[in-house]
Amino acid sequence: MGEPPDDSAAVSADERLRLVNALDARQRLLETMLSIQRSIAMKQPLQDLLDAVTSGTASLLDRATVALVLPVPGSECLAPVSTRGPANRADNPFILDAAAEAITSHRIVSRIDESDPNQTKTIIAAPIVVRGVAAGGLAAEIATGQGSDVDQHQVLAAFAQQASLALTEARVSEAIHKAQHDAITGLPNRGLFLERLNQSISTGNKRLTDVTILLVDIHRFKAVNDSLGHKAGDAVLSAVAERIRSTLRSSDLTARVGGDEFGVLLEGAGTQAGTRIARSIVDAIRQPLRISGRSVYLSACVGVASCRTSSAESGDLFNSADLAMNRAISAGPGRIEVFQPHMHAEILERINLLDDLQVALARTQLRLQYQPLVDLATGEPVGVEALARWRHPQRGDVAPSTFIPLAEETGLILDLGLWILREGCRQIAEWRQLVPGIRLNINVSARQAMDPRFVERVEATLAETQLPGPMLTLELTESMLMGDPERAMVQLRQLKNLGVKLSIDDFGTGYSSLSYLRQFPVDQLKIDRTFITGAASSKDELAVTKTVMDLGRTLRLETVAEGIEDAQQLDVLRTIGCDLGQGFLLARPMDPGAVHEYFDRLMSDRQRTAE
């Protein structure tokens, strides 16, 4: 007979097999962990990483059913986002409950599931921690008796840690993306644009290659946003972003750098290429958009700046493009301006001039001159227009065409306009003692007219100077009224309630919409001087001017011709029935003292005529 089996040898073989299996499992676990970590480092898609976690867990736990659960956005409920195993087991309530308990208790939990009469199962769940907070759970359903509880817990904890790393990296990446990108268009924002610009210049300087940026301003976006609403405005921005991208190379960068401003970074492209692309952008944006069931028409202005020097700075290049863009905006919709060095000197000059204008306004260094408005039928003055004048201590006389637009652009026009209103009304109130019927005309800028406090300030000035409302005429431009017709209508009606008269200045140079002209409560049309100049020498210009006069009479509006400089123009205007006239032929702008003498002389002439 043979020798009985050696029990100790059998035990030793089983132990060796167990150790080999354990080592194999640990090797597989280590390799899977390293694979997942490499994928995280390579910024693989989050879903791929989570699937790798559940797949690895199921493999190490002998094909267990595994579910990785996360909170449903906007809800307290949990839902599987990645599963392995039978589909009908992944959303098992026992698995979700175990995951919820692991999240709440912040520890690994183990439960027995006896719902299946054929086989008892163990459910183990581990919390997934992101920045110290349990943000999800990894749960596995395992047939009871498979493997060691300690091994199962360790495996689940290890894979939960990998899920934590993946989610942490994803949230950090998401936070960084949100911090560097515009939420509406998805484009890089100003900060990321400047960062990329700095990198491009550094690289370009080493290679001595060109770097060009474009700054694109969207004309009329605010009007669209205000009229159609912010949702439509967001849709417009997204559509504009897509149109800009469609004109570029895949290597070019587009960014939203401001409310209605976009930036474009062109590496390896000079001024000529930048200008060509800018034209493509302008043409693309000019095409109508269909937003909220309406056709929306936009235009753009573009500033172009390039550099090819080892001393270039990203901030300098951006500022140069910004200066060029502002120059393009001033020139009108659809314009493209390339930065030139003299623009820096001009902007510095504007800044210095603005500082001086603020000082002049604070120290009352400005003055008003007054130009009479004359009744063309009688030759008698019926009013005066107040005109701001500025004599600078060093610069001499600064033209209104220089400092008025500057004040308008910077908002200083509100203070300047208020000073003109108060000083003009005070002076007219004084002159009314000599000429009771004298009226005052004052030009009002768009910013003034749309200022919520403008009507209140007019009312306070009239009360302070005791000037009757009908003695004040405010001159507005057509373009100002048409910029925001509804708001303009509200302001004009409130002014009319004060008795103030309203005039449309430079009529014929703006929108000239007859329908709006009928709606606005205006009293006077002031015909632009270009029509007056041509009326005396051209039959066509005369016909146009006569048509405007006829329009004024039809609408029962007083008509005023400005810029009358010779007798022939005066005769034509009298012939076609113009009511009032203004110009050098009739009277030049005068200082207050000269105006007083002007009225004294008229009064004396009347007395002599009466005698």
Image (spheres, grey):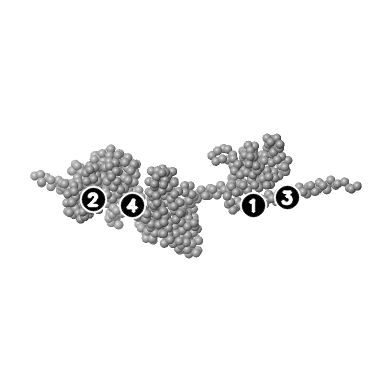
Q: Position of residue 151 (x, y in %)?
A: 71, 44
Q: Is residue 418 left or right of residue 316?
A: left
Q: Amino acid at mark 1?
A: Ser
Q: Amino acid at mark 4?
A: Leu
- Residue at point 65%, 52% (across, down): 34
Q: Which residue is labeled 1 in the image?
A: 35
Which of the numbered marks, if any, corresponds to residue 406?
4
Q: What secondary structure is marked by label 2?
A: helix
Closer to the chain start, of discs 3 and 2, is 3
Q: Measured along the vertical axis of the image, is residue 493 above or below residue 311? A: above
Q: Which residue is labeled 2 in the image?
A: 544
Q: Name the quadrant containing residue 520.
A: top left
Distance in Å between CA atoms under marks 1 and 3: 18 Å
Q: What secondary structure is marked by label 1?
A: helix
Q: Which residue is labeled 3 in the image?
A: 23
Q: Residues within 10 Å of mark 2 (few under 14, many from 20)?
A: some
Closer to the chain start, of discs 4 and 1, is 1
Q: What secondary structure is marked by label 4?
A: helix
Distance in Å between CA atoms under marks 2 and 4: 33 Å
Q: Is residue 173 left or right of residue 232?
A: right
